[in-house]
Amino acid sequence: MVSRNILRALDRIQLTIILAILGIPIVWIFMLAFKSRTEVAALPPKLIFTPTLENFVELFNRNDFLHATINSMIVASGSTVLGIVLGVPAAFAISWHRMSWPATITLFARMAPGTLFLLPWLIMFTKLGLVGSHLVLILTHAAITLPVVIWVLLPYMDALPRELVESAQIDGARQDQILRLVAIPIVSGGMVVAAILSFVFSWNYFVFALVLSGIRTKTAIVASFNFIGEGVTNWGALMAAAVIIALPPLILTLLIQKRLVGGLASGAVKG
Amino acid sequence: MRTSSKNVLAGYHWMAAPAMVFTIGMIGFPIGYAIWLSLSNVPPGGDPVFSGLENYARLVKDPEFWNAFKLTVSLYAMSLSMQLILGTWLGLLLGRSRAAQGLTRVILVSPFMLPPVVVGMMAIVILDPSFGIANWLLAQIGLPPGLWLSDPKTVLFTFAVLDTWQWTPFVALIVMGGYLSLPAEVFEAVELDGATSFQRFWHVTLPLLGPTLVTAAVLRSVDILRFFDVIYLTTQGGPGNSSTTLNILAYRRGFEFFDFGYASAIMITLSAVVFGTVLIFSKLRAAVAW
Amino acid sequence: MKIRYVLGAAALSVALSAPVAAQTFNWRAHEGQTINLMLNNHPWSQAMRDLAAEFTAKTGIKTQIEIFNEEQFRARLTTLMQGKSADLDVYMSLTSREGAIFEKAGWYADLAPLMADKAMTMPDFNYEDFSASIRAASTCGTKIVALPINQEGPLFYWRKDIFEKCKVAEPKAIEDLPDTAKALKACDPSMGVWAARGLRGAIPYSLTAFIHNQGGSYATPDGKPGLSQPNTLKGLAMYASLLKDYGPPGALNHTFTQVIELLGQGRIAMTHESSNEFANIMRFPGRAQDLGVKVMPPGRDTKISKPVAIGWTVTMSPNSQRKPASWYFLQWATSREIQTKLIANGVAPPRASVFEGQEFNKWIAEMPIRKAWADSLIEIGKTGTGVYQSPTDRVPEARDIIGTAVQEIVQGASPADAARKADEALAKLQ
């Protein structure tokens, strides 16, 4: 049918426009990472230029950026794992009993401005001797990934057919078995989404790391702030840092995207 | 057949316990401490001295506070509405066309993966009226340059646009996920009934997407109301006070002017505002469940 | 008699041995310790990071240096100090800005006893090498709160080649500036003429000369906020109008980074910006040849030239558990030897001996513009002031209010109104 083809074409056009709006600024920034220092802020912008790696070289030589990136990896992974381990069962319970309040409580961590936690956490963790460790960053970041996991999983859990659970119960399954063998396989798509989002949120969060990290556990985001400040803004190095910082989440998504779409489309939910 | 009626009634409450214990352990003390600070006079370097509701009384009379409150709410309204509307449209588009694969997915996910530093720098590099490429582009096609973040009249809207640019794909993915998990029979049935696509959307799709939209709205709300990072990096609340949202105001009072008690009062107030908003959405979620 | 002799000899030997042992300053006395430093992003800090290895080689004390840019530095420092963290030993501070607040909060350790202790301080430290005014800036009574690491102030930079091309004379009095700007604009409307700080908290630094040179002051004779005084209004109005009429679009969000970028790229003809940025500006091609630099010209009738002159300092946390080792770093970093090395990084030395020394003069002689820069620094060292707000301890807030007033004038408010509002707000800080 003609109209259907037109609709499909319209869809494709809209999609292309959106992708351009989303993608071009990012591509632009990435290009800047490969421009030499004086070219970066120059106008009119040079679209054709000789790419240089000098920004990246400076990034890794003069700054401990590799180390910072590894720290970000450790912290983001740790807090994601912790968030999933705590959040998946919680989301199931919340959805099953249709309780709202536990989900809301975990959201408190995201309701207060991040800066509110700085001073008290510093005091708390100084007493525990954890300041400057990876653990303190993992714990504090988990406080913000946990609500993400729970809230993202809730609709998936809500869509879980209750008959499946009930029949498993009737079959004599234990509660944790039900969670593992019935619920999780069905919501696995949602879990992947939740995990990716947690990772990214934790990865990008700077406020806590700014104060609670030590010299050896500084995360990449905090390290990247050094390129703005007294002296001419080092656009090139900052953009290079931006590229490095944005890469792991992007790569992760690339790797997992198939599973993601698969999970969403599999729909044991659809019957 | 063993009818374990006990099992059917058994609670899964315990499964939520670890998360609850963790949360309360981690954020209980900070929130309590912040409340105490907000009720005290805290000289820099000194210990807090209880002063009752003094900080809150000052807050209520402070025009800067109300200005920040107004700005926060405006930014929230603009950002959230744009994101939800565009996000739903994009989410449905993605769901329909099953285009969320490969490169498309990467492009979709990229904006909200970006760290705030990058978005802030992007805003400056692209939007700075003197250095930015946006005005240069406008000049090339003969349009007058905009002041974007440098004009008190447009700065808030510019932040709203930035946030929308970054997070619409996020909303879209959530909507897409919800859309794709909707039972297909409903759509088939409605199509057979001869409804127009708009009617289909308005009476079927949208209500079915209710819970999904509420989730997206809650997750965005808590962030937009506390919008901080990009403002902090670009205008620091300026020009003048025209982008000093509550979070920025609290930060400046605390970390630049060393007025911790008052800053805590502002932060607690902001937390209460966010909490209230989340409560409203919670009720909404129960209302639109199906 | 024998006993007396013996006692005498014993007393003499005791007298001889004990002080000698106490007076030996040993660089390696605290070998093996590690100190944590937190520095602001500044040419000095960058240079320090590179030179730190020398310190470790000399003393055996290891250093962990963190460099943050201003906003993050402040957030982290404030939290660590308020939380009484022992993780921080040494940090940079701008005493002219936060000195009063930090001292009241007890966030500076007292360096005086350490300096007086001959066993702890290198014999040729020579604290008097710093001028009286520089020393005063980091002293509170008898308590020495910090050591100076540089001196800086805003200087007038202008493009000699553009001025020549447009046949515009170099401004000799500050009142000449608006006309100079007008002439430059008329000469080439497509080119940028002026840029300056427009970000609220950053404005006073560049603004002050405009006020002082025209006979104004931030305070009234009886110590109240004095922005509404006629001469002060003149200064505010001139700065604001230059920004509004001849400044780049978006100026209200600009701080020195953008201004320097514009100057370096050759997109403006003149500005009033920090001497610190000198090294960075010189990196841009051509600027070393076509720029002139001098102190902002005095008022035509008042003949006053009183810009800002400040200096960063480095200090010790009172919560530090490694005070002696930290003190070793502080004196090493501010020693004549190190400050001489830092010249090459464009860090203006606060020590008179370095400033007048051979190495500095050699460096200056390499480029004529360097001499102009050095001479300007000498001048503002004599004429400049570190106080550029109305009388109060809450300096950051005061500067913020003053900057807001300028922003309001740029956006159309009358100087009198903006000043009056600012004075009211400033009065609350007293």
Image (cartoon, coloured by chain):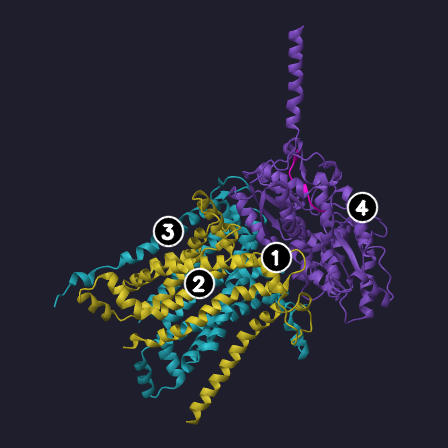
Chain colours: A yellow, B cyan, C purple
Amino acid of disc 4: Gln
Left or right for A158, reference A172? right
- Chain that bears disc 3: B
In the foreground, C129 or C366: C366
What residue does disc 1 label?
A62
Is residue C412 depicted above or below B213 in this figure? above
Amino acid of disc 2: Phe
> Nearer the viewer's eye, disc 2 or disc 1?
1
| Label 4 crowd (10 A; few <14 / some 14-19 / many >=20) | few
- Chain that bears disc 2: A
Quadrant of the drawing holding the C terminus of chain B: bottom left
What residue does disc 4 label?
C358
What residue does disc 3 label?
B24
Residue visible at 78% across and 45% down in the picture = C355
> Nearer the viewer's eye, disc 1 or disc 3?
1
For the question of whether residue C364 can be seen, the reply is yes
Q: Are marks 4 and 1 in contact (CB under 8 Å)?
A: no
- Chain that bears disc 4: C
Instruction: Report, in whole angstroms, how far the alpha carbon at label 1 lies from the one at label 3.
Output: 41 Å
Amino acid of disc 1: Arg
Residue C230 among those drawn in magenta: no
For the question of whether residue B245 can be seen, the reply is no
Instruction: Report, in whole angstroms, how far the alpha carbon at label 2 lies from the one at label 4.
Output: 57 Å
| Mark 2 or 1, nearer chain start | 1
Are discs 3 and 4 located on one and the same chain? no
Is residue A131 depicted above or below A266 in this figure? above
Left or right for C245, reference C51? right
